[in-house]
């Protein structure tokens, strides 16, 4: 069996600066928050760009794991292309999923690990880089303390995150 290293990287708050859209999340106006026009206006967070470059140079397989819904794949790909990111596999939240984001990402990582093992690929390292501390805690709880890194270069105020989730 082939052993590899996998870096899973979140998009919003890690690669994309969504600060110009966050007020829509606070109002739970998800149509505007996820509108193509508003998403395409996101700037690149240079630390996220550097993270991808570094992990590729270190020999990691790099893929994206986002809480964005599957119906946003086209806009997400367009944003990545526009900002000249390398072509990467994107794992998105399926339509209709009711799981909290932290649970979804931890479960997805476990499923991905099992699926790849069936394909003959094991990972000596599988690490998620995410800006949401709840996601990081849940992934570490389910997959171990080395399985998630909290990205702190773009911190949303906790009240903002809590308000957007309720």
Image (cartoon, helix red, strand yellow):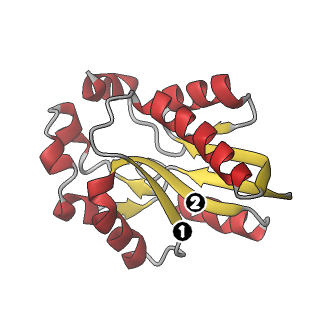
Q: Are marks 2 and 1 in contact (CB under 8 Å)?
A: yes
Q: Is residue 98 above or below residue 15?
A: above
Residue 77: quadrant of the picture: bottom left
Q: Is residue 80 above or below residue 45?
A: below
Measuring 28% from the left and 45% from the top, which residue is drawn there? 95
Q: 76 or 4, which lies in front?
A: 4
Query: Residue 58, percent across and down?
Result: 79, 65
Residue 99: quadrant of the picture: top left
Q: Is residue 155 left or right of residue 72?
A: right
Q: Is residue 47 left or right of residue 45?
A: right
- Classify the position of the C terminus by image quarter: top left
Measuring 21% from the left and 32% from the top, which residue is drawn there? 26
Measuring 70% from the left and 58% from the top, which residue is drawn there? 119
Query: Residue 25, percent across and down?
Result: 22, 37
Mark 2 and mark 1: Cα distance apart in space? 5 Å
Callout 2 secondary element? strand
Q: Which mark is residue 150?
A: none
Callout 1 secondary element? loop
Q: Is residue 106 left or right of residue 94?
A: right
Q: Which mark is residue 88?
A: 1
Q: Is residue 134 left or right of residue 77?
A: right
Q: Which mark is residue 63?
A: 2
Asked if residue 5 shows in the view, the reply is yes
Measuring 56% from the left and 52% from the top, which residue is drawn there? 9
Q: Hey, which residue is sitting farthest front in the picture? A: 118
Query: Residue 112, percent across and down?
Result: 61, 47
- Classify the position of the N terminus by image quarter: bottom right
Q: Is residue 88 above or below residue 28?
A: below
């Amino acid at each position: 069996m082939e052993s590899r290293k996998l870096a899973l990287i979140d998009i919003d708050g890690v690669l994309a600066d969504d600060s110009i859209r966050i007020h829509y999340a606070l109002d739970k106006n998800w149509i505007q928050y996820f509108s193509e026009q508003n998403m395409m206006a996101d700037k690149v967070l240079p630390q996220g760009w550097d993270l991808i470059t570094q992990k590729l140079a270190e020999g990691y397989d790099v893929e994206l794991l986002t809480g964005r819904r599957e119906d946003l794949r086209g806009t997400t790909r367009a944003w990545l292309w526009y900002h000249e990111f390398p072509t990467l596999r994107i794992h998105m939240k399926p339509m209709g999923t009711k799981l909290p984001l932290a649970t979804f990402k931890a479960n997805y990582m476990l499923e991905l690990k099992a699926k790849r093992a069936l394909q003959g690929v094991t990972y000596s390292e599988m690490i998620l880089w995410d800006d949401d501390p709840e996601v990081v805690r849940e992934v570490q709880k389910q997959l171990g303390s080395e399985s998630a890194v909290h990205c702190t270069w773009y911190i949303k105020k906790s009240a903002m995150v809590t308000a957007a989730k309720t």
